Image (spheres, helix red, strand yellow):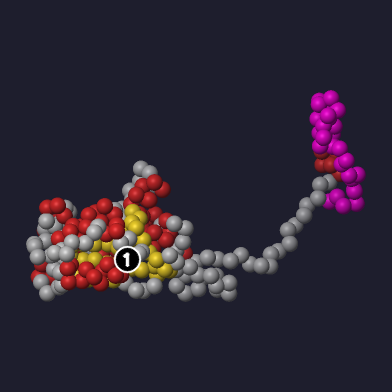
């Protein structure tokens, strides 16, 4: 199972208003394990970045002046994501921008859904945690995932964080420790799986005394009388062994 966790940064909020992608960040997972085979690229948008957007991601027009355009690397990008499941937080936003970029090309490509399946972790989170905040930061707090390095939005960093969030949401974690000899080994963090010791102390058995046994049988006898002799609990009760009573 090949999954690609993807995030983008853009010049603004709406591709129908001419806004463009300026950064794509992807991390790959095979069978729910991070492979380290990432895709990360800054892009020259050929338009100005809105001030509000720049305050979110910190990327300037000057920084992007010498970067490639989306069309320069579209084949590499589609080759990387092709056939995978794309995992995106608030997928309509990123998918809308990707499809807008694909439609702009001279040799127009089909929508990204033609190449990949799409999973929206925001939609997942809303079903799992209705009525709660489900931003990426809120999910990090909920699942105890460290996002302290996320002072600004960045596509690759956000993809790496989202991968950990997705694994936690779906019952796995990015760094599982299954070392029976080291219950809290280096790098285990809060996600370490701790094994119970195989040798346990014998449980102390406290047996009923004579007075307690007599009260018990008296109670059963009363139940039997009240039920007209139909009480099943006292049938075949073994004889008391007063030698074992404490």
> Where is residue 50 shown, x and y percent of the image?
11, 58
Q: Is residue 10 visible?
A: no
Q: Secondary structure at mark 1?
A: loop
> Where is residue 33 shown, x and y percent of the image?
43, 68
- Quadrant of the image containing the N terminus: bottom left
Q: Residue at x 16, y 55 (%)?
A: 15
Q: Is residue 194 visible?
A: yes
Left or right placement of residue 130 versus residue 158 in this view: right
Q: Residue at x 90, y 48 (%)?
A: 241
Tell me where the magenta segment starts and ends, as one range: 217-246
Q: Residue at x 14, y 64 (%)?
A: 106
Left or right placement of residue 157 versus residue 187 in this view: left
The local crowd at label 1, few if under 14, some if 14 to 19, many if 20 or more residues have their Cα within 10 Å, is some
> Where is residue 36 shown, x and y percent of the image?
36, 74
> Which residue is the site of mark 1?
82
- The mark total stands at 1
**In this rendering, is residue 205 above or below 63?**
above
| Frontmost residue, 36 versus 106 | 106
| Frontmost residue, 125 versus 141 | 125
> Where is residue 188 shown, x and y percent of the image?
47, 70
Which of the 4 image quarters holds residue 89?
Answer: bottom left
Which of the 4 image quarters holds residue 145?
Answer: bottom left
Q: Is residue 221 magenta?
A: yes
Q: Residue at x 29, y 59 (%)?
A: 114
Q: Is residue 132 magenta?
A: no
**In this rendering, is residue 58 above or below 237?**
below
Looking at this view, name the residue that lies furthest to the front.
107
Which of the 4 image quarters holds residue 75?
Answer: bottom left
């Amino acid at each position: 199972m090949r999954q690609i966790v993807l995030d983008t940064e853009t010049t603004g909020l709406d591709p129908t208003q001419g806004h463009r992608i300026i950064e794509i960040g992807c991390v790959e997972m095979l069978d729910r394990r991070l492979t380290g085979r990432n895709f990360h690229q800054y892009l020259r948008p050929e338009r100005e970045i809105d001030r509000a957007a720049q305050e979110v991601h910190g990327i300037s027009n000057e920084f992007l002046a010498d970067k490639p355009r989306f069309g320069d690397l579209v084949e590499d990008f589609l080759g990387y994501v092709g056939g995978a499941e794309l995992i995106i937080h608030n997928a309509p936003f990123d998918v809308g921008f990707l499809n807008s970029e694909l439609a702009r090309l001279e040799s127009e490509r089909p929508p990204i859904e033609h190449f990949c399946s799409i999973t929206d972790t925001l939609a997942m989170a809303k079903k799992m945690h209705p009525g709660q905040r489900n931003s990426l930061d809120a999910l990090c707090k909920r699942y105890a995932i460290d996002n302290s390095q996320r002072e600004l939005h960045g596509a690759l960093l956000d993809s790496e964080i989202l991968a950990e969030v997705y694994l936690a949401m779906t019952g796995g974690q990015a760094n599982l420790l299954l070392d029976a000899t080291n219950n809290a080994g280096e790098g285990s963090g809060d996600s370490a799986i701790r094994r119970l010791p195989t040798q346990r102390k014998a449980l102390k058995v406290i047996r009923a005394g004579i007075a307690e046994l007599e009260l018990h049988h008296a109670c059963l006898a009363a139940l039997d009388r009240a039920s007209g002799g139909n009480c099943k609990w006292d049938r075949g009760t073994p004889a008391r062994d007063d030698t074992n009573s404490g």
